[in-house]
């Protein structure tokens, strides 16, 4: 068996996948906590902790961490999502002992110095400014806020300028104590490694973390509401998102929805790309995407186009979705979509970062390893009728939302895109 799992006495889970021919190892410390777990007044704190955890420990300064990584040619980074936070690194296999020591040190022993906090707040505020100056990203944030409403899933991962400015060291310590508990932690690693040796080393490094006595707060049940929102801004283009609820990461329906997404706007041969970009030249960027969570999901279409062409682009989006809903598909379409997805999945098996990420996400979602054989078998079971049903289930008039950002007003939209 290439993948193995060990649960330490304090509840930390270690999952590895051996890739004997690889020259590298990817390792990540994952915490099952993200922006949807934040209180309203603390928006952005998990993302801020992600930044601060690299700013020095009791043993290493931030400069020493950077120099040590550069000295071995290693790559290290972190990211925060709405449901998880991850600190990871990729190194040559001979440097595995060092990276285990480094990752455990920053995770357990970060000092969160006050002087570093003020500097890093400035960095995060610049990150927020950069996002707001990138309309293709900003419209997605605005769409999430409108779509999920007051639910934490709709809140920006970066937080706001006000909430970030208000974060204190006590807040960080409180959140780390509250959420960075062993039972929420998964350590995932993939590459040329020996599971038993890794387990022995990491158990010694992490055994000082006590098992949490009281459970972390439960997540709220996500809710959404249809909405139409316009955000006027002087830009060269109009950026818009049209979307609705979709299946969760564990739902059986996600396979049909993934194929629907591929056919609609998931690749270069998709209907959106071919009709709006290739045949008509209305946009450079146009695509559809799925955002899945443990208990909810969302699908949306994004396009950026000139103000004068917004109505034409929006009308085409609606027509292409309705075409699939009418059954304008054949077995060839289905076969090509499945093969495209299969290729993407199997090519990912040659990337240790992808393997490491998949180990952790399967543990959080399913509590077990899901083999590629199982995954592809479920994908290949999907029928044309199920894809059509997925298109109808997602894009129905009861649940659609539209967000528009750019130099246009609501009364200039002639198409009713949420009337399906």
Image (cartoon, helix red, strand yellow):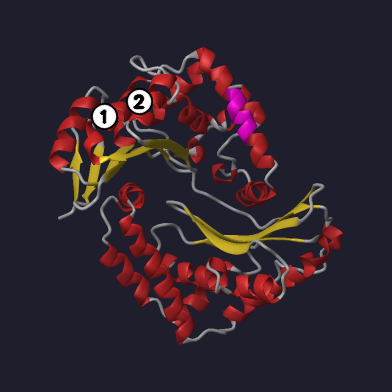
Q: Position of residue 220 (x, y in %)?
A: 49, 43
Mark 2 highlights which residue? 68
62 is higher (above) or lower (below) than 383: above
Say if mark 1 contacts mark 2, CB within 8 Å.
yes
Q: Residue at x 53, y 19 (%)?
A: 117
Q: Quadrant of the N terminus?
A: bottom left
Q: Residue at x 83, y 55 (%)?
A: 408
Q: Secondary structure at mark 1?
A: helix
367 is higher (above) or lower (below) than 374: above
341 is higher (above) or lower (below) than 214: below
Q: Position of residue 338 (x, y in %)?
A: 41, 74
> For the residues marked 1 and 2, what is the alpha-carbon distance in whole angstroms?
9 Å
Mark 1 highlights which residue? 98
Q: Secondary structure at mark 2?
A: helix
Q: Residue at x 35, y 75 (%)?
A: 380
**Residue 24, quarter of picture:** top left
Residue 252 appears in view: no
Say whether disc 1 or disc 2 marks the residue closer to the N-terminus: 2
Is residue 155 magenta-colored? Answer: no
In the depicted view, which residue is nearer to us: 303 or 377? 303
Q: Position of residue 28 (x, y in %)?
A: 33, 39
Magenta extent: 121-127
User: Foreground mark, 1 or 2?
Assistant: 2
In the depicted view, which residue is nearer to us: 408 or 343? 343
53 is higher (above) or lower (below) than 375: above
Q: Quadrant of the C terminus?
A: bottom right
Other-residue count near label 2 (Cα within 10 Å), few / some / many at <14 / 14–19 / ≥20: some
Residue 75 appears in view: yes
């Amino acid at each position: 068996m290439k993948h193995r799992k060990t649960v330490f006495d304090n509840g930390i889970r270690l999952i590895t996948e051996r890739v004997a021919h690889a020259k590298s190892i990817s390792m990540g410390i994952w915490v099952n906590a993200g922006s949807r777990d934040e209180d309203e007044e603390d928006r952005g704190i998990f993302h801020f902790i992600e930044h601060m955890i690299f700013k020095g420990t009791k043993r290493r300064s931030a400069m020493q961490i950077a120099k040590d990584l550069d000295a071995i040619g290693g790559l290290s980074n972190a990211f925060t999502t709405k449901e998880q936070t991850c600190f990871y690194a990729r190194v040559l296999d001979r440097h595995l002992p060092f990276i285990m020591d480094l990752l455990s040190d920053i995770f357990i022993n970060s000092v969160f110095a006050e002087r570093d906090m003020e500097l890093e707040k400035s960095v995060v505020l610049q990150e927020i400014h950069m996002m707001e100056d990138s309309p293709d990203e900003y419209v997605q944030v605005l769409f999430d806020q409108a779509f999920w409403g007051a639910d934490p899933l709709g809140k920006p991962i970066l937080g706001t300028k006000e909430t970030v400015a208000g974060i204190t060291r006590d807040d960080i310590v409180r959140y780390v104590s509250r959420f960075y508990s062993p039972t929420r932690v998964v350590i995932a690693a993939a590459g040329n490694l020996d599971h038993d040796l890794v387990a022995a080393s990491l158990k010694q490094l992490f055994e000082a973390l006590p098992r949490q006595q009281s459970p972390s707060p439960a997540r709220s049940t996500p809710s959404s509401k249809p909405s139409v929102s316009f955000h006027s801004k002087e830009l060269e283009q109009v950026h818009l998102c049209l979307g609705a609820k979709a299946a969760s990461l564990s739902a059986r329906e996600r396979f049909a929805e993934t194929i629907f997404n591929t056919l609609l706007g998931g690749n270069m041969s998709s209907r959106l790309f071919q009709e709006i970009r290739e045949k008509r030249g209305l946009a450079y960027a146009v695509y559809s995407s799925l955002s899945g969570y443990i208990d909810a999901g969302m699908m949306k279409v994004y396009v950026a186009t000139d103000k004068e062409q917004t109505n034409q682009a929006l009308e085409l989006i609606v027509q292409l979705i309705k075409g699939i809903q009418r059954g304008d598909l054949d077995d060839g379409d289905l076969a090509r979509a499945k093969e495209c997805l299969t290729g993407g999945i199997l090519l990912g098996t040659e990337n240790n970062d992808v393997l490491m990420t998949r180990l952790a996400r399967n543990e959080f979602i399913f509590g077990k390893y899901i083999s590629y054989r199982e995954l592809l078998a479920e994908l290949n079971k999907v029928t044309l009728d199920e894809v059509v049903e997925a298109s109808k289930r997602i894009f129905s008039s009861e649940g659609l939302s539209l967000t528009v950002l750019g130099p246009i007003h609501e009364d200039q939209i002639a198409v009713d895109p949420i009337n399906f």
